Image (cartoon, rainbow, N blue to C red):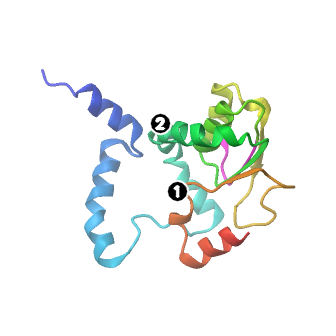
Amino acid sequence: ELAASPALVALAAETPGGLDGLARIWGHLPTFLRTGRAMDRCDGTPLERKRSYGRTVGALGRMFASSAAALAAILAPLAPRTALDVGAGSGVWSLAVAQAVPGLQVTALDLGLDDFAERARALSLDERVKLAPQSFHEPPLGEGCYDLVMLAAVLHLEPPDAAEALVRN
């Protein structure tokens, strides 16, 4: 009887859309390289964006967990007290930093924050998190000043003018 290897099972669990999603991503690569056309449209209305990204955010969190932990180890010596996570998604990046920096308060800004809230609860960090459910294209981007602003895995989803405006904000 044939069975998938543990590595293949892990890859399928960590990839948005599983192995079908992985095949779709790699299958689209030649088209992207020839035309620059994105695989998925991510510049629609807030509701369209929430639906589109909501299907993949949990898997992206699992996929980037080890990279987020490595980033957190680099940022921890800076000892930030407050962080704004713009386009927070699953919270993989900012919550990894919160795990590494005792007392860090995180404001998560995104259209859908269910995965973020679930991850924060699972890591026992929910008391150090403020949820700001809004589009990152709508000011204000959080309230007050922050020691750390995270903008991870967001800009590549935006058209150039929207990405530039987001960085300016």
- Marks 1 and 2: CB-CB under 8 Å? no
Q: Position of residue 105 (x, y in %)?
A: 78, 39
Residue 81 in sight here: yes
In the picture of the structure, the residue carrying the numbered disc 1 is 52
Q: Position of residue 89 (x, y in %)?
A: 60, 48
In the picture of the structure, the residue carrying the numbered disc 2 is 66
Q: Residue at x 41, y 69 (%)?
A: 38
Q: On screen, 149 above or below 66?
A: below
Highlighted range, magenta: 106-114
Q: Residue at x 79, y 30 (%)?
A: 127
Q: On screen, 30 above or below 85?
A: below
Q: Amino acid at mark 2?
A: Ser
Say whether residue 57 is magenta.
no
Q: Could you give the CA–CA distance between mark 1 and mark 2, rounded to whole angstroms?
A: 24 Å
Quarter containing the C terminus: bottom right
Say whether residue 107 is magenta.
yes
What element does badge 2 sit on? helix
